[in-house]
Image (spheres, rainbow, N blue to C red):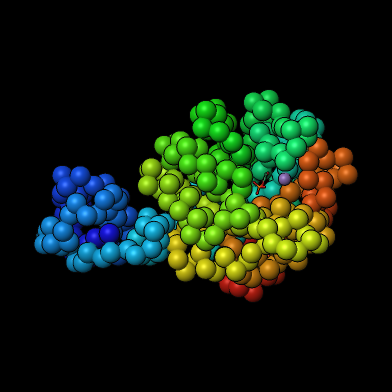
């Protein structure tokens, strides 16, 4: 249920409604728009009758949200949410580029990648220190040493850091180093991890699981929002289909659909979405044309020697070329690269 306050309502009026919601045993979530304040009511709505809230001063309307996700829905917040990652704003008119290696491998590999993607115009540096690998024999990441290298790369370049956290017990540690914490596709429905991330004061990048429906994806975002973290960016990274010529099928349909149904920003990862370096540029163009708020791209100084995902990694030169080519698409859809 959401409560729309009238345009004349003061902060005290909204506070009064929030207090009443709490007295009734439910949780209020306030969203201040440019024109109106909306209050989301989370909990067992059978405990209350609409009139208990609709008759309070300056309440304009009380509306039931029929969708299972509430705080992630456009009904709850009409304006686009803008997420601030170390000063870089995701969800506004500017398209934000995140780039870097799949895995943090060494100081030299990370610093050289960071410097080249920054020079090409990327705003955020990605890199995995904890890697969710299919094989237990594959490189699992440098762990905290990798986080330290990422922090050093931030010191040197000034770029904000995006890195994956795989389990609840490591959330505080990763949050000490990262500017944005990534939930990998395999963990999208790890509800304990989502609950832990809902309690921190850092933005979360939530990647879609390869078999997740739209509803499941937004319900995972709802875990973060309902627990108190409203700094959430969604990421489409490809789903499993019958096709065998790409690693995954990049579901670009979801970008405009998420824009209709939710106020949260959505970015696209064409690297994991295709698994092929030769498809990253065309699918980056397509993602921006479809309305993505940013892209996440894997870049490695020597893809053939990468510890993970070399097949889909771009060289710094190709990444720099990509940055030039996608600017034209951004401008064509009334946006620009941030
Ligand atoms: C990654 O971005 O490093 C990654 C492992 O991606 P995904 O979780 O989408 O597979
Ligand atoms: Mn990867």
Which quadrant holds the N terminus? Answer: bottom left
**310 sits left or right of 39 in the view:** right
Residue 256, placed above or below residue 168: below
Q: Position of residue 4 (x, y in %)?
A: 25, 63
Q: Residue at x 59, y 36 (%)?
A: 166
Residue 338: give x, y in percent of width and height. Answer: 60, 57
Q: Is residue 157 visible?
A: no
Above/below status of 66 relative to 316: below
Q: Residue furthest front?
A: 242
Which residue is nearer to you in this view: 287 or 167?
167
Find residue 178 and report its image quarter.
top right
Q: Residue 64 location, x and y as percent?
A: 28, 64
Q: Residue placed at 63% from the left, 54% from the top?
A: 210
Residue 52 at least partly seen = yes
Left or right? Give the position of 5 relative to 203.
left
Q: Is residue 283 above or below residue 146?
A: below
Q: Quadrant of ligand 2?
A: top right
Decide which of 13, 222 is in the foreground and name it.
Answer: 222
* Percent coordinates x, y for residue 20 in the rendering: 15, 49
The extreme top residue here reads 145
The residue at 27%/60% (across/down) is 2
Residue that sits furthest to the bottom in the current view: 332
Left or right: 155 in relation to 216: right
Q: Residue at x 67, y 28 (%)?
A: 143
């Amino acid at each position: 249920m959401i409560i729309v306050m009238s345009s004349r309502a003061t902060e005290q009026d909204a506070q009064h409604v929030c207090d009443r919601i709490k007295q009734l045993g439910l949780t209020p979530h306030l969203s201040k728009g440019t024109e109106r304040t909306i209050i989301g009511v989370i909990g067992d709505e059978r405990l209350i009758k609409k009139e208990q809230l609709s008759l309070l001063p300056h309440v304009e309307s009380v509306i039931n949200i029929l969708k299972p996700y509430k705080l992630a829905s456009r009904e709850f917040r009409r304006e686009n949410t803008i997420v601030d990652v170390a000063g870089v704003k995701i969800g506004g008119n500017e398209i934000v580029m995140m780039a870097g290696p799949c895995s943090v491998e060494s100081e030299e590999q990370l610093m050289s990648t960071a410097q080249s993607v920054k020079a090409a115009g990327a705003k955020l540096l990605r890199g995995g220190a904890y890697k969710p690998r299919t094989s237990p024999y594959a490189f699992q990441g440098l762990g905290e040493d990798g986080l330290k290298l990422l922090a050093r790369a931030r010191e040197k370049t000034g770029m904000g850091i995006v890195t994956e956290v795989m389990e609840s017990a490591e959330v505080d540690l990763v949050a000490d180093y990262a500017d944005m914490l990534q939930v990998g596709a395999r963990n999208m429905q790890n509800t304990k991890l989502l609950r832990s991330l809902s309690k921190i004061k850092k933005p979360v990048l939530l990647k879609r699981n390869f078999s997740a429906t739209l509803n499941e994806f937004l319900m995972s975002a709802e875990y973060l929002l309902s627990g108190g973290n409203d700094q959430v960016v969604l990421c489409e990274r490809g789903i499993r289909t019958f096709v065998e010529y790409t690693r995954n099928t990049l579901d670009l349909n979801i970008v405009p659909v998420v824009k209709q149904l939710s106020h949260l920003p959505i970015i696209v990862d064409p690297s994991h979405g295709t698994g092929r370096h030769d498809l990253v540029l065309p699918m980056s163009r397509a993602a921006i044309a479809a309305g993505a708020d940013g892209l996440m791209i894997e870049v490695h100084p020597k893809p053939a020697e990468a510890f993970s995902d070399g097949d889909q990694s771009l060289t710094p030169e190709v990444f720099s070329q990509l940055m030039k080519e996608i600017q034209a698409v951004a401008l064509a859809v009334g946006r620009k690269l941030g």
